[in-house]
Image (cartoon, grey):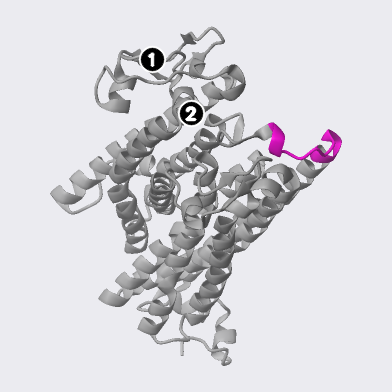
Amino acid sequence: MAFTLASHILLVPFGVALPAITLLMHYRGLRKGDAVALLLARRWSAVMAVQFAIGIVTGTVLSFEFGLLWPGMMGRWGDVFGLGFGIEAWAFFLEAILIAIYLYGWHRLKPWTHFWLGLPLPLAALMGAFGIVAANAWMNTPRGFTLDASGKPVNVNVRQAVFTPMFGPEYWHFVVGVVLTAGYVVAGVYAVGLLRGRRDRYHRLGFTLPFTVAAILTPVQFVLGDSIARSVFHKQPVKFAATELVWKTDTHVPEYLFGRLHTDGSVSGGIKIPQLDSILAGFRPSTEVTGLTSVPASDRPTVIQATIAHWAFDIMVTVGSLLVLLALWYGWCRLRRRELPRSPWFLRCAALAGAACLLTVECGWITTEVGRQPWIVYQNMRVSEAVTGTRAASLWTMFGIVVVVYVLAFGSFLTVLVKMSHRWRLADEGAPAGAAAGDLEGATPYGPRPLSTTASGDGGDE
């Protein structure tokens, strides 16, 4: 489950946010009559479709694993929090239909009609994120039910089960995080091109729009990250203690940047900042922070799990802080000179920003899942009660098959992207003088068609 989730989540930012970024570029192209912007939007829509196809494979495997690996959880709690998965499934089908319409519409529909038909795409993507985050937020702060004498959930309240205390902080932190991640990744592709001397408007616009979106959202995400950490402090104090390596309940608690927790409660390595943890949690040094020893050892993460959650959280904060500095650098140059920063170091940092964001997405889910151990449903069901009883040999066989499937899927994804990029470059280099590069691509956004095929009446650019 950890492998499949960690792999699938790399595609999530593009599934959720790339439609919005593509439509933003599409709108710019229509509003300003900008052929370059329309060409970028058209090509990004092709990437969006390929990513969605790969996401079908990785997401389907993940959905099967809920039943195969967690029968205890799904059998007991599925009726309570399963609505989130139902919402995600409906959003998935709706998104598939809308992507098909959007791809078909290039050069076949009136320009503004095509744009308006694509506009619901980001909403469908957000609806899918709504369902998944609602399910995860419920697992962290379960609500909307009562337990009968045998311990089975009854009297399910759907509204309370969906809108749990952690849903709001998790949802907005997740949505903003995936949008800025997609923005930095897309911009990073064009940053590499700019570093290689491709200073044409195509690369500058391909970099500027997604990077501007990401730069605007970066400080917003930093504030949201602080808000969700404070929500965990109030709603899941033991998880907060694990992510901050707090051993005993106390005030004036120091903050550790990285470091390793030991079984005696000591922390080795890292940087210790006196009182900072209490200040961050409650805005004053006298704030009392709950420690791991406030609950029995069987009800809290182990020292290894706490260290893993702590490192994941600190990596998130570190990368987020560096991205804020990068966004400020970009904003200063844009406001002062109305142009991109001239230093090649800026472009190098921008090229790395996307990979750093993907790392923080992974770290966010590690913090969420590992920090609440040993609970699969916080304070209601342990992992040991939820997991399948299948023999270890069968699990290893299943794991091997899943690894092979995912390697093939991601290998295919990268191969298709490389081939599309190559064909697009051929189209750009082969465009006649005075013609838009997109004219060689016919009625498809997947690359240039032979000119004879286009001329033979396949629809072309009519």
- Image height check: is 180 above or below 443? above
Name the image quarter holding the N terminus: top right
- Point out the frontmost of discs 1 and 2: 2
- Image height check: is 378 above or below 415? above
Which residue carries the number 2 mark?
239
Q: Label 1: few (<14), some or many (≥20) within 10 Å?
A: few
Q: Residue at x 45, y 23 (%)?
A: 241
Q: Is residue 392 magenta?
A: yes
| Amino acid, disc 2 | Lys
| Amino acid, disc 1 | Ile
Relative horizontal placement of residue 249, taking residue 151 as reference (left or right): left
- Image height check: is 388 above or below 408? above
Q: Is residue 33 visible?
A: no
Q: Label 2: few (<14), some or many (≥20) within 10 Å?
A: many
- Kindly report the distance in space between the C-alpha atoms of the residues bearing marks 1 and 2: 21 Å
Q: Position of residue 278 (x, y in %)?
A: 31, 21
- Image height check: is 267 above or below 213? above
Q: Residue at x 46, y 90 (%)?
A: 462
Which residue carries the number 1 mark?
271
- The reply to whether discs 1 and 2 touch (Cβ–Cβ < 8 Å) is no
Q: Position of residue 208 (x, y in %)?
A: 31, 56
Q: Position of residue 356 (x, y in %)?
A: 45, 39
What is the number of callouts on the image? 2
Say what secondary structure mark 1 lies in: strand
Q: Which residues are magenta?
A: 384-395
Relative horizontal placement of residue 233, taking residue 453 as reference (left or right): left
* Nearer to me, 25 or 273: 273
The disc placed on residue 154 is none
